[in-house]
Image (cartoon, grey):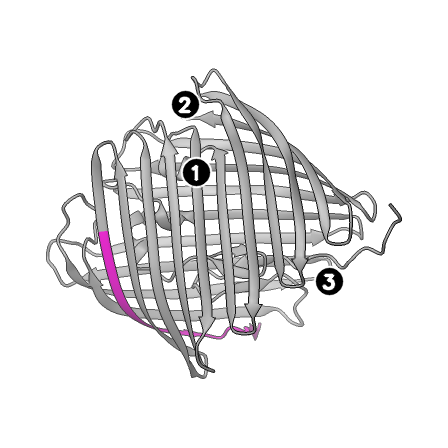
């Protein structure tokens, strides 16, 4: 195969915590201060995420602060997003959830780059369903992550922390080597167990054409508190840039758990995203990976999500999202299954203001119990999306 000219480095994105989309991690013209505020009101059928909850009217206040700055080679993004909810019903006390993230990306030279990532949440976990919708970057499309379908009841105050590093090395115009190490930890005041998992991975990617690459990888996971064992595996995959705005990624292979019980199986990951026209976008994701720290102690977590966004007017967009999450052999609450669905219509009001009508539904089951929850909200959001110099 004759060598070809390498393309420009892919733009890296970080989700905005206030749900307003993706932030490109490119060199800004100036240091940016990002500010925002969301006010919401509506109806919640089960604010406590209980097996038999009482419905209530609800109000939410969620300020947002982000700092984005850097040099031509290093970018820094820090975000903080507290969420406060109050309820009309006397059955529920006020709730608060704090969400914070930090992201630092660097380009040492044309061959070497790195990415540091950290995140933390603390507060009542059920608040997430009425908060501004959290997103993940699927290519350059903001999608709904599997955490939207991941809730445990009667958890009290939940604390989650995670982070990791990724190192990227372009060995040649056609070869890429990556190494990553990720760790996450969760604890709940209403449950006796805390839990965590650390995963390391190595991948080698070779381009067979300007649009198609083959990948081989190896990964290991270590579970701790209270499960203590190790998982090893590897496999193969492909990456296909089918069109300028359409991409597909597939990978999978065997995973072997050591001293974890009879939990060997296939680990896989898949994603697809496309901009079908100037007015619509579609994304699909699916994965089965070892580790389920967010849901509690477990060995396997299976996730899937899909979404469709359509620009219906010059100022209005309509999007549908669905997410699924399951975790096997949870020590605290047996196996878990959860489904999340939303429908959101949003439109621009001008001067940084946006309004939206949303309907969200969640259904989950674990250990013979089940929860159903429905939320209808009207939200008004202000944000200086372009940021201001500081």
Q: Position of residue 27 (x, y in %)?
A: 68, 65
- Residue range in magenta is 373-390
Which of the numbered marks, if any, corresponds to residue 72? 3
In contact (CB < 8 Å): disc 3 and disc 1: no
Q: Nearer the viewer, residue 116 or 2?
A: 2
Q: Residues within 10 Å of mark 1 (few under 14, many from 20)?
A: many
In the structure shown, which secondary structural element does the residue marked by tag 2 occupy?
Answer: loop
Specify which label sits upstream in the sequence, 2 or 1.
Answer: 2
Indicate yes or no whether the magenta region holds residue 363.
no
Question: Looking at the image, can residue 96 be seen?
Answer: no
Examine the rendered structure and indicate whether residue 75 appears above or below residue 207: below
Residue at the (72%, 49%) spot, across then down: 212
Give the spatial CA distance, label 3 vs label 1: 39 Å
In contact (CB < 8 Å): disc 2 and disc 3: no
Q: Nearer the viewer, residue 122 or 173?
A: 173
Say left or right for 152 vs 185. left
Give the spatial CA distance, label 2 vs label 3: 44 Å
Quarter of the image with the C terminus is bottom right
Specify which label sits upstream in the sequence, 3 or 1.
Answer: 3
Q: Nearer the viewer, residue 85 or 238?
A: 238
Residue at the (80%, 53%) spot, across then down: 110
Quickly name the residue at label 1.
Answer: 302
Q: Nearer the viewer, mark 2 or mark 3?
A: 2
Examine the residues drawn in magenta and state their main secondary structure: strand
Quickly name the residue at label 2.
Answer: 227
Quarter of the image with the N terminus is top right
Give the spatial CA distance, label 2 vs label 1: 19 Å
Q: Nearer the viewer, mark 3 or mark 1?
A: 1
In the structure shown, which secondary structural element does the residue marked by tag 1 occupy?
Answer: strand
Q: Residues within 10 Å of mark 3 (few under 14, many from 20)?
A: few
Say left or right for 52 vs 320. left
Examine the rendered structure and indicate whether residue 374 appears above or below residue 115: below
């Amino acid at each position: 195969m004759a060598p070809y000219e390498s393309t420009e480095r892919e733009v890296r994105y970080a989700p905005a915590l206030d749900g307003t989309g993706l932030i490109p991690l490119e060199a800004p013209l100036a240091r940016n201060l990002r500010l925002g505020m969301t006010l919401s009101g509506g109806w919640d059928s089960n604010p406590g995420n209980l097996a038999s909850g009482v419905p209530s009217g609800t109000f939410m206040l969620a300020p947002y602060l982000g700092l984005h700055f850097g040099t031509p080679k290093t970018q820094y993004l820090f975000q903080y997003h507290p969420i406060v909810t109050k309820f009309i019903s006397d059955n529920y006390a006020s709730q608060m959830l704090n969400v914070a993230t930090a992201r630092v990306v660097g380009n040492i030279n044309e061959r070497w780059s790195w990415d540091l990532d950290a995140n933390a949440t603390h507060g009542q976990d059920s608040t997430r369903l009425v908060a501004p919708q959290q997103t993940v970057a699927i290519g350059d499309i903001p999608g709904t992550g599997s955490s939207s379908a991941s809730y445990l009841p009667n958890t009290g105050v939940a604390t989650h922390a995670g982070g990791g590093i990724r190192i990227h090395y372009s060995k040649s115009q056609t070869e890429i080597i990556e190494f990553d190490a990720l760790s996450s930890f969760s604890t709940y005041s209403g449950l006796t167990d805390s839990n965590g998992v650390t995963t390391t991975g190595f991948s080698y990617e070779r381009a067979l054409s300007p649009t198609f690459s083959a990948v081989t990888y190896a990964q290991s996971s270590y579970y701790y508190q209270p499960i203590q064992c190790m998982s090893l595996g590897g496999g193969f995959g492909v990456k296909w840039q089918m069109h300028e705005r359409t991409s597909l990624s597939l990978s999978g292979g065997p995973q072997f758990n050591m001293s974890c019980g009879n939990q060997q199986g296939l680990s896989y990951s898949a994603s697809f995203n496309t901009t079908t026209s100037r007015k619509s976008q579609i994304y699909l994701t699916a994965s089965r990976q070892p580790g389920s720290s967010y849901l509690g102690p477990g060995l396997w977590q299976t996730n899937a999500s899909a979404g469709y966004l359509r620009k219906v007017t010059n100022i209005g967009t309509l999007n549908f999202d669905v997410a699924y999450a399951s975790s096997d052999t949870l020590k605290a609450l047996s196996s878990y299954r959860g489904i999340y669905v939303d429908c959101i219509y949003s439109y621009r009001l001008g001067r940084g203001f946006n309004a939206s009508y949303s309907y969200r539904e969640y259904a989950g089951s674990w250990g013979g119990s089940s929860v159903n929850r429905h939320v209808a909200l009207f939200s008004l959001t202000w944000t200086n999306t372009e940021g201001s110099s500081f």
